[in-house]
Structures are given as structure tokens and as C-alpha cells.
Amino acid sequence: MGVQIAFALQNANISRIFQTLGADPHNLSYFFIIPALMGMIIQPLVGKYSDRTWCRFGRRKPYLYVGALVATIVMLFLPNAGSLSMSFGLAMAFAISMLMLLDTSINMAMQPFKMMVGDMVNEQQKTKAYSIQSFWCNTGQLIGCLFPFVLTWLHISNEAPEGIIPDSVIFSFYAGAAILILCVIITGFSVKEMPPQEYAKYNTAEEGAEEHNESMFSLLKKAPGNFWRIGVVQFFCWFAFTYMWAYTTAGIADTVWGTTDTKSAAFQDAGNWTGVIFAVQAVASILWAMVLPYFKGDKVAYSSSLILGAIGFVSLIYMNDLGVMFSVCPEYIKYLLFIPFILIGCAWAAMLAMPFSMLTKSLKSNIGTYLGLFNCTICVPQIVAGLLGGHILKAVGGASITMFFVAGGAMLLGALAVAGIKTKTE
């Protein structure tokens, strides 16, 4: 939950931060390449080396501690990028550097808790266990997304001079940092990882097996087919969500608040509302995560959820027109945005639970390394989406909201790709 608060604050506010500093909207998607690159580098390494680690603090937990500590420190600096009397170029460079450090540390903290679930539950429990994890991840996302809105409601300033990040965002990062470190301390004291002998007793891989010395490239060659099949689904899903994170604030500011001026109070209000609708997505994800274990099969649960997400992305484009059509008071049209984000939340719940459940059922050893490598199926699509974002935005007319057509199409392709995943009953 604590790690996801940090992740949610980043995803909901990073476009707003960079646009407030003066970034061109056509370049927004490039900033989302940084998290993906850090994930590709850090998570496989954490997976590989934590598979071989055992010390007084545990197996996965030492990496969780280091990542969370660095993330906490960086969260105190990132939102102050515009407050250090630097030029535009230096402020952007500082913000990018802090974003890189934040992503490195979040990825270092995020991978261990995914691995611990795979380590500590049996095959029959994994779908339920990862659904529970999805519940807590989305609870963290809910908290992180709502922080700026709630602080503004508490009369923390949501406006600031040109190029300065509002206090509502700055103090949100401070609060998120405090909760992150508290949550990690609680986890550290309450979770008891299995020592090597006990782990070997309950897993097929023997303690000290030579396979742990294999290179990551060798393991990739031996990866089960589902590693690649689920990876195809992951590509389309994370491609879609990259554009949601990059273009929601600008898109709803333009269509619902009627502004593209990043210096205006209306744009900052739209930024706060982005957090609110992302929180709605998180609530929907929490509830949907409880439903997923009751589907007749993992593939049905996965594909159905992604189809709902595709509908949500495309319908977002028409919410303002829908409000006008039914003569909804302009100040209430923003509430119609809850509808598509409820549907998007269903897809997000499945994305957090189903891939890991289905993959770990196909793995017999080197779980940490494989989960780290599997993270590349999350990172590569974000890099591709980031590189293509500006070009696609121009191709679809330059309005940020139209990027949700692209996101919806990608999510639908992901739902179709689920059919290629193999289960033991097939």
C-alpha cells in the first residue's frame, strides 16, 4: 500500500508537475520513458539477486527497505523542482533527475512484495493472494490520488506563481513519503520470510540449486511459453495506460474545464480532479479485485476486465458531449468522468492480479528472477508509447483527449491476446 501511494502520486501528478514547469504537451509522453527504463534495469536485477539472498533481515525485505528509504527521500525533493530559483532548463533537469531516482527506488521496493507472494503461497492460493495484493495496491492508489484534492479542500493552496508547483501537490508528496516509510516498517516487523531450508521444503527447487547461477539470458531461453503469451497482453495494456497517465489532465482540462493554459487556476483544478477520477478508478479496482477469484477461469476474468477497460477509455472522450446532450449543469459534468474510470478500474485490477497469478503457476524455480524479467513486459510498452506519443498526438489532431481512442484500441487488442494464454485445462 505504501509503495503504491508513491506510485500513484507520481502517475497522477508528474504530467501536471512538468507542464507547470513549462513542458510542451507534445513532449509529455517522453517523461514516461524514464520510469519504464528504470523498471527494466532494476526489477530483473532485484529479482536475480534476491533469489540468492538470505540474511538476518530476510530474502526480499532488504531490497524493500533500501528502495523505500531512497523513495522517501526523493519524494521530499521532487515537487520542489520549481521552488529552488533555478532557470527553466535547470529546473527541468532537476525534476527529471529526481523522477529517475524516484522510479529507481520505487521499482526496487515494488518487486520484493510481488515476489514474497509467489514465495509464500501455494498454487491454489495464488489467484486469491494476488487479488488481495491488488486490493491493497489499489487502496494505496486511492490514498495517493486523493491527496491534492483533499489538501485543497483543507485550504492548502492549489495555486502558485508561474513555474512553481502548488503547495497542495508538494505536501501530498510529503505525506506520501511519511506513509510509505511507516508501511514498510510495519511490513518488516509483521512478515516472516521462510529461511532457505524451509523454502526448499515447500518448493520444488532445492536449496542451493545450480539453476540459481544461470544467467538471465539463459533463463529467458528456457522461459515457459506463457511468459511470452502473457507478455503480449501486457504490452497492449501498459501501452494504453501510459497514455492515460500522460494525457488525462490536459485532456479533461481542455474538454471539461475549457482551458489549455497550464498557468490557469482551471488547469490546476483539472489536475486535482485527475487525482479524484484516478481514485475512483482505484475504488473500482478494489471492488473488482474481490470479484476476480469468482470467475470460472482466469482467462475469462482477464479478458472480460480488459474489454471493460477498452470501453472506459473510448467513452471518456464523449463524457462532455453526453453532459451537454442531457443538459447537465456544466459544474457537474466532471462527475460523469467517474463512469469511464470505473470501467478502467476493472481493467487495472486484472492487470495487477491476473498476469502474476497465471505466470507464477507456470514457474517452478527462479521465481524472483523471472518476475523481474517479466517486468520488462510492463516497461517496454511504456517506452514504445513514450517514443511514439508525440507523433501519434499529431496524427490524431493534436487534442490530448483523442489519445484515449488509441488507448482503447490497445486495450481491446490486449483482451483478444488473452486467448493465446495456455492453462492446465487446455
Image (cartoon, rainbow, N blue to C red):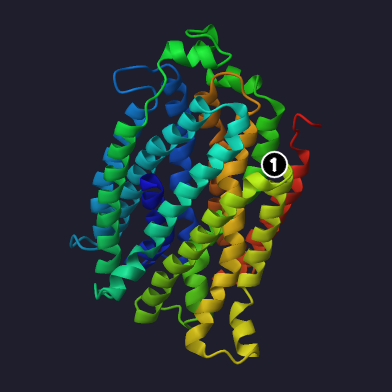
Q: In terms of depth relative to the viewer, which is nearer, 423 or 235?
A: 423
- Is 302 left, or right, of 86 in this rendering? right
Disc 1 crowd rating (10 Å Cα; few below 14, some 14-19, many 20+) is many
| Count of all numbered marks drawn on residues in the image | 1
Q: Which residue is mark 1?
A: 298
Whether 16 is drawn above or below 214: the answer is: below
Give the x, y percent position of residue 123: 61, 28
Q: Please tell me which residue is depicted at 43% across the width and 16% down the height of the picture.
A: 52
Check the image and name the residue furthest to the left: 85
Q: Quadrant of residue 269?
A: bottom left
Q: Please tell me which residue is depicted at 26% across the width and 56% down the height of the picture.
A: 175
- Residue 44 in sight here: yes
Q: Quadrant of residue 362?
A: top right
Q: Please tell me which residue is depicted at 51% across the width and 88% down the height of the picture.
A: 330
Q: In terms of depth relative to the viewer, which is nearer, 367 or 97?
A: 367
- Quadrant (top left, top right, bottom left, bottom right) of the C terminus: top right
Q: Quadrant of residue 308?
A: bottom right
Give the x, y percent position of residue 276: 44, 68
Q: Please tell me which residue is depicted at 46% across the width and 63% down the height of the picture.
A: 279
Question: Which amino acid, mark 1?
Answer: Asp
- Is 96 left, or right, of 345 in this rendering? left
